[in-house]
């Protein structure tokens, strides 16, 4: 009889232990399921990069944004794709400010001698002009008009004549699901 009572106590203790583990697992699962997803950190489109004098600057180091000043719908997007295909980093696209009158292409910048501006001017061709003007778009800003059709050959790189800064595409590491 004592052996039977001991066996029943052992069975009850085992069942209570398993029930406690089950409840702990349910509580952990519920808290994990109802926890909000972590917010992703906003990554900027480009990073301000120092370019010492005499350094070669290549298209993949330059972020370009394009605005459409013409009447052709989608011109900024098509121009952006041409620039990305030529190796430039993708910036922003949109429409030029109201009242902007550009026939071919203009590069808006506060530093006309910047190597990124010179490299882009080579790809846009002689018909393009560089205008000293502020812009809210990131990187080097190109304003295209209805006469713009294609990029020119241009150089594969340009050399920085003086110490300067360019907006280079931000490198985003792939998320492999592993948290450091």
Image (cartoon, helix red, strand yellow):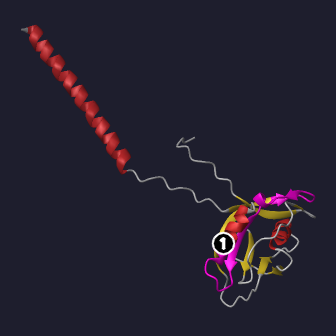
Placement of 30 over or under 101, stated as above or below: above
In this orientation, which residue lies closer to the viewer: 175 or 50? 175
Q: Which residues are magenta?
A: 50-78
Q: Secondary structure at mark 1?
A: helix
Magenta-drawn stretch contains 54: yes
Measured as percent of width and height from the top left, residue 19 is found at 23, 31
Q: Is residue 40 left or right of residue 95?
A: left
Few, some or many residues within 10 Å of mark 1 (<14, 14–19, 20+): some
Task: Kindly identify which residue carries mark 1.
Answer: 78
* Identity of the residue furthest to the bottom in this view: 99
Image quarter of residue 121: bottom right
Measured as percent of width and height from the top left, residue 29 is found at 34, 42
In this orientation, which residue lies closer to the viewer: 98 or 35? 98
Specify whether residue 137 is in view. Answer: no
Q: Quadrant of the N terminus?
A: top left
| Residue pictured at 69% horizontal, 84% vertical | 69
Magenta-drawn stretch contains 173: no
Placement of 129 over or under 22, stated as above or below: below
Measured as percent of width and height from the top left, residue 9 is found at 15, 18
* Identity of the residue furthest to the left in this view: 1
């Amino acid at each position: 009889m004592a052996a039977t009572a001991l066996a029943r106590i052992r069975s009850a203790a085992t069942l209570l232990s398993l029930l406690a583990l089950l409840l702990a697992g349910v509580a952990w699962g519920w808290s994990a399921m109802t926890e909000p997803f972590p917010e992703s950190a906003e990554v900027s489109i480009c990073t301000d990069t120092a370019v010492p004098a005499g350094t070669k600057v290549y298209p993949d180091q330059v972020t370009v944004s394009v605005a459409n000043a013409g009447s052709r719908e989608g011109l900024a997007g098509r121009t952006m794709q041409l620039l990305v295909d030529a190796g430039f980093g993708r910036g922003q696209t949109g429409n030029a400010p109201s009242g902007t009158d550009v026939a071919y292409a203009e590069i808006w910048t506060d530093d006309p001698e910047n190597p990124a501006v010179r490299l882009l001017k080579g790809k846009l061709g002689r018909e393009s002009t560089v205008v000293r003007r502020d812009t809210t778009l990131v990187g080097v800003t190109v304003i295209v008009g209805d006469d713009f059709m294609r990029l020119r050959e241009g150089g594969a790189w340009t050399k920085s004549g003086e110490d300067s800064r360019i907006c280079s595409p931000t490198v985003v590491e792939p998320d492999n699901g592993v948290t450091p």
